[in-house]
Image: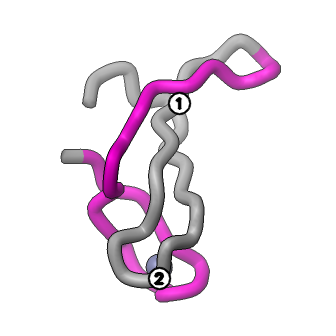
Amino acid sequence: MVDAYCVKCNATKKIKRPNPVKLKNGRSAVAGICPTCGTKLYRMGSSTI
Ligand SMILES: [Zn+2]
């Protein structure tokens, strides 16, 4: 499980369906959606999910 901050919920949420992504600057991150509101969430610098 990966936590990320959701700006809509104004709280830290567990990312739903997390998947690793590569950012433009070459760093890795984890992308997914908020389980509460469905907003896209990103967690930077997470190499493990
Ligand atoms: Zn949310």
Disc 2 Cβ-to-ligand 1 distance below 8 Å: yes
Q: Residue furthest bottom?
A: 9
Name the image quarter holding the C terminus: top left
| Residue 43 x/y as whole percent | 49, 45
Viewer-side residue, 40 vs 24 = 40
Q: Which residue is mark 2?
A: 37
Numbered range of the magenta stretch = 2-25
Query: Residue at position x 53%, y 30% from top?
Result: 29
> Is 16 a magenta residue?
yes
Q: Is residue 36 above or below residue 32?
A: below
Q: Residue furthest top?
A: 26
Judged from the image, the secondary structure of the residue bearing numbered disc 2 is: loop
- Residue 29 tag number: 1
Query: Residue at position x 58%, y 60% from top?
Result: 40
| Residue 46 x/y as whole percent | 40, 30
Judged from the image, the secondary structure of the residue bearing numbered disc 1 is: strand
Kind of residue at badge 1? Ala
Say whether marks 1 and 2 touch (CB < 8 Å). no
* Magenta stretch prevailing secondary structure: strand
- Residue 39 appears left or right of 35: right
| Residue 26 x/y as whole percent | 71, 12
Mark-to-mark CA distance, 1 and 2:
21 Å
Kind of residue at badge 2? Cys
- Residue 25 appears left or right of 48: right
